[in-house]
Image (cartoon, rainbow, N blue to C red):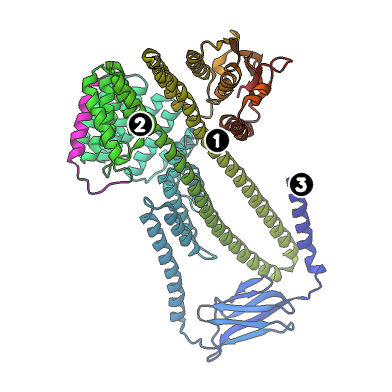
Amino acid sequence: MVRSKFIVFLCSLFTMVAFSQQQDGRKWVEIKGSVKGKENYEPISGVDVSTDSGYYTTTNSLGEFRIRAAIGDMLIFESGEFETARHRITSEEDVDVLVEGYAPSRSSKKEKKLSSISRKVENHQRFLDSANQYKRTDLEKSIDFIAQSISQLGKRGNKTELSNSLTALGEIYLYHQQYDLAISSFKDALTARRTVKIELLLGQAHILNGEFEHGESMLAPLVDVNGLVPYQRIEIYEGLGDANKGLGDVQKALEFYQEALQIAEKNQISPKVIDLNSKIADTYARDNRLVEAEGFFANSLNLSKQVAPERQIQENEKVADFYNEKNRYEDEIQLRKQSLNELQQLPSVSVNKDNATAGLPDSITSQQINYKIGRAYIAQDKLDEAIPYLQKSIVEADSEDDLVVQKDATRRLSEAYRYKGDFAKALETYQDYVAVVDSLYARKEQEISRAARLNREIATKQNRISSLEQERELSQSKYSLALTEQQLFEEASKRQKWIIYSLIFGMVLMALTAFLFYRNNQQQKLANNLLALKSLRTQMNPHFIFNALNSVNNFIAKSDERSANRFLSDFSVLMRSVLENSEEDFIPLPKELELLELYVRLEHSRFSDKFDFSIEVDDNIDVEAFEIPPMLLQPYIENAIWHGLRYKEEKGFLKINVSEVTKDKLKIVIEDDGIGRKRSAALKTENQKKQKSKGMGNIKKRIQILNDMYKNKVEVSIADLKEDQTGTRVTLNLRKD
């Protein structure tokens, strides 16, 4: 419907413009004239002559001009050599304009014109330098400077300068991991001016965005380009290696890395030699070729000792992670202790936002290394050695406000106490862990809010840059059109033909603008949906944790230590899985069923006298082929237990059944023979009636957003189980992607 209206609008516009000359009743004429200095009658060239109806031209070397206008139009004469002059057209007579205060020599005119151009270029470069200065510290300010640099280009800006601005914008987005925006900026820069540097940056941006095939297709042709400096050629081969590693072609990735390594060694580019040795080792490790991997890791370690200590620490940690994956915990611990010693010797004069030492990634901190050492000791059952490192990690993380490390270290410390049999300290530490998790969730909500605000501001600034570029393009189009019309006056036989071509160009430009506007709206809608979905998942986890902790309190109140310990053990497993899945839109269905079975067992341990349960999955179903949003079924099961079965006088039954509807569709049914929804509603207190279930409301919103994004993937219906309105049946239909 919208598209058809837009086509009708374009057709109407074409018709109106094509016949406006005959229908507006105005008398159009060709005005000839000249512009000269009043004192010496010297002709002035390069004067911008325009009308208030939109026509434009410039004076030639003799100061003469021709322009199309209508009787009553205002002629406007603009130049840097004199104040703007105006003249109202009252007839077809020639217009000779004499301006006051113009008496420069020809050489001084040329110098002033060059000086004006030079100032614009100088200002453009100054704004670019300012953008690069704030690139790492202030994203918004750096984008503002890019916009100002583009605004300096004027109506007929140099495409090289425009390309430089757009390239700098792409590099800013690349540094701040806004890969989609970076790709868009680099593509615009390539449109203005094609260079190897921009193509290389665009290929790297595609790879960082996970678009490995696009990255490879962009970088592969650069291999045959002549005249590249060695560093560029290294980056090309390194990027091709990254792309092929991402595509799973280990052998090709190794070949490209080896080619890059040879060039780096030949030209003695030490940082790249270390990087490439490390990447080759990592590639071998992924292919389970451990001997080769260890050899290249040894090379990277030895080379890193010859450069800055920060680089050595980075490489130590990377190799230590490799040892951890291969269960070589003693080697891992030895390397991490070396990193700790090196880290303590580094000067702490520059500190980044996460209090990590300058020059190191945010994840390499003293608290992080201590935590990993403690984790390695636990893996070897050396609990006494692990506990001091975990305690030190918690103290350091607390002082540095590093909640993520504090959470992980506290959980590990609780497990270590539990393994030792010190259940009192285990419980106390676990309570600290729950408190840290609560704080972490609160911070995540704040980060989501800040990210949403930043995204809105970035979108606003990006729109401003796009508007500047569109204005520049439209001004260039207007200038080109005016020159074309001047030629049409001189070649009367071709006038109508060029008018039609110009109109078609304008229609295509408008159609393209409308398409880009529509596409941007769709992308913004998708971004908003993802943000809302992430927010709902973040709300769901604390809600579930707080409800489940009520069950823990019950056992503690009864002083049933064995049941409480068993419950805490199962509950920690459940929580770990819930936290791991909290960032995912969908998880495998078997994983969700395992979590549900663990949750039902936990509730059954508390209400064993109230209900029994069964979980049945049809043997003919390929459950591995289906995915489901995490924590989608748990609120329905929770309602069945807490509002249906718990109030039943005799023992009830909870049944969860998974059956196949078609090859691409499953039906999951949750049935309970409890008191039913009507009686459960009647039992609620007045205060409970006023409050809506946060969990159920959250689930409805999640299903609505997911169905909007994935085209009705999930369908849920709720009905009474029996005709007397007792019992409840929840039916969920799940489609395969």
Tell me which numbered mark, 2 or 3, is placed earlier along the sequence: 3
Q: Nearer the viewer, residue 580 or 418?
A: 418
What label sits on residue 533 in the rendered view? 1
Instruction: Look at the image and tell me in which quarter the N terminus lies.
Output: top right
Q: Residues within 10 Å of mark 1 (few under 14, many from 20)?
A: many
Count of numbered circles in the view: 3
Q: Nearer the viewer, residue 723 or 517?
A: 723
The secondary element bearing badge 3 is classed as helix
For this view, does 706 lie left or right of residue 583? Answer: right
The secondary element bearing badge 1 is classed as helix
Give the magenta part as a residue range.
Answer: 328-352
- Amino acid type, callout 3: Ser
User: Residue 421 magenta-drawn?
Assistant: no
Q: Residues within 10 Å of mark 3 (few under 14, many from 20)?
A: few
Inter-mark Cα distance, 1 to 2? 24 Å
Q: Residues within 10 Å of mark 2 (few under 14, many from 20)?
A: many
Would you say the residues marked 1 and 2 are in contact, meaning their CB atoms lie under 8 Å apart? Answer: no
- Amino acid type, callout 2: Lys
Residue behind mark 2: 407
Q: Position of residue 324 (x, y in %)?
A: 29, 23
For this view, does 157 lie left or right of residue 485? Answer: left
Residue behind mark 3: 4
The secondary element bearing badge 2 is classed as helix
Q: Position of residue 673 (x, y in %)?
A: 64, 13
Inter-mark Cα distance, 1 to 3? 33 Å
